[in-house]
Image (cartoon, rainbow, N blue to C red):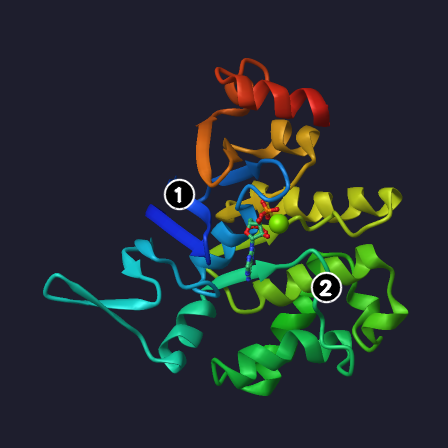
Amino acid sequence: MVQVRGLWKSFGPNAVLRGVDLDVPAGSVTVVLGPSGSGKSTLLRSINHLEKVDRGFVAIDGELIGYRRVGDRLHELKEREVLRQRTGIGFVFQNFNLFPHLTVLENLVEAPVGALRRPKAEARARALELLERVGLAEKADAYPRQLSGGQQQRVAIARALALDPKVLLFDEPTSALDPELVGEVLDVVRDLAGAGTTMIVVTHEIGFAREVADTVVFMDDGVVVEQGPPAEVLDAPRHERTRAFLAKVL
Ligand code: ADP
Ligand code: MG
C-alpha cells in the first residue's frame, strides 16, 4: 500500500533522511520509534509531499506521490494535483490543528465539501457517523477551545477519516496531552487498527506499539536501524542503538 524507496532529504548541510525504505501493507499498522531529531516527522511529511525529498520516491497504491513519471524522469505535479493526492493521506498532528473558528462538525465537513465536492448533507451525515465512532457525537456544535486536548485529538482523527483516506499518518498524536488523556486517544487508534485501517504511527508509547503494531520501525540519525514485529524489535532488538533507545524510554 505505502512504498517508500531510498528517501534522502537534507536541510542545508543537515542530512535528515539518509536512504529510508519502508513498506506498509494494506490494513497493517506500522509504529515508528526513534530519538528526537532522528527524522520521523520529516519521513511522515515526505510521505504526503509536505516535504520535497532530494532523492527517492513514495508511492501509495502504486501511485507516485508528488510526481509523475515521464520516460525515466520524474516531473513534479501541480499543487492542485498534490492536494488531490493528499486527500487520500490522512494526517494527524501532535497539536491537533483543528480550525478554531469552526465547530467540530464544520471541521469535519469542510474538506469533503471543499476538496472532494461532496454534497453538504452527505458530508454532514458522514461527519456525525464519525463523531459517533470517536465518542463525540454530543460535541458536534462545540468549538475546539471548549474541548479537552484528548477530545480535540479525537475530532482531528475523525476529521482525517472524513476524507476516506487510504492511509492515516500520526505524528506523536498523544505527546501534547496530559497523561490522563492519552488513553482515550490511543483507544480510538486501536479501534481503527482493529477495523483494518492502514496506519503509520510515530509515538513514544511503547506499550501501545507492543499491543497494536504489526511492524515496529526504529529510526536513528535518518536511517531505519531495524524493523520487524514488536516481539523482535522491542523484546529482542538486534542493534545496540535500538537497545540504548529502549533502555531510555521503557
Ligand atoms: P523527529 O521527528 O524524529 O524528532 P524531525 O524530522 O523533526 O525529527 O527533524 C530531524 C532533523 O531535521 C532535526 O535536526 C531538525 O532540526 C531538522 N529539520 C526538520 N525540519 C526542518 C526544516 N524545515 N528546516 C531545517 N531543519 C529542519
Ligand atoms: Mg517529530
Instruction: Kindly indicate the quadrant of the structure image that contains residue 125.
Output: bottom right
In the image, residue 231 lies at what x, y percent? 55, 18
Q: Is residue 15 left or right of residue 156?
A: left
| Direction from residue 97 to residue 146 in the image, left or right | right
Determine the secondary structure under disc 2.
helix
Q: Is residue 245 above or below residue 198?
A: above
- State yes or no: Cβ of the residue under disc 1 lies below 8 Å from any atom of ligand 1: no
Residue 209 appears in the figure: yes
Q: What label sits on residue 18 in the rendered view? A: 1
Q: Residue, x 29% and y 61% (percent of image)?
A: 64
Assign a secondary structure to mark 1: strand
- The amino acid at mark 1 is Arg
Q: Quadrant of the C terminus?
A: top right
Q: Nearer the viewer, residue 162 or 36?
A: 36
Which callout, 2 or 1, points to the residue nearer the camera?
Answer: 1
**Percent x, y for residue 215?**
49, 32
**Any mark on residue 155, and which?**
2
Between 67 and 113, the residue placed more toward the observer is 67
The mark that comes first in sequence, 2 or 1, is: 1
Q: Is mark 2 within 8 Å of ligand 2?
A: no
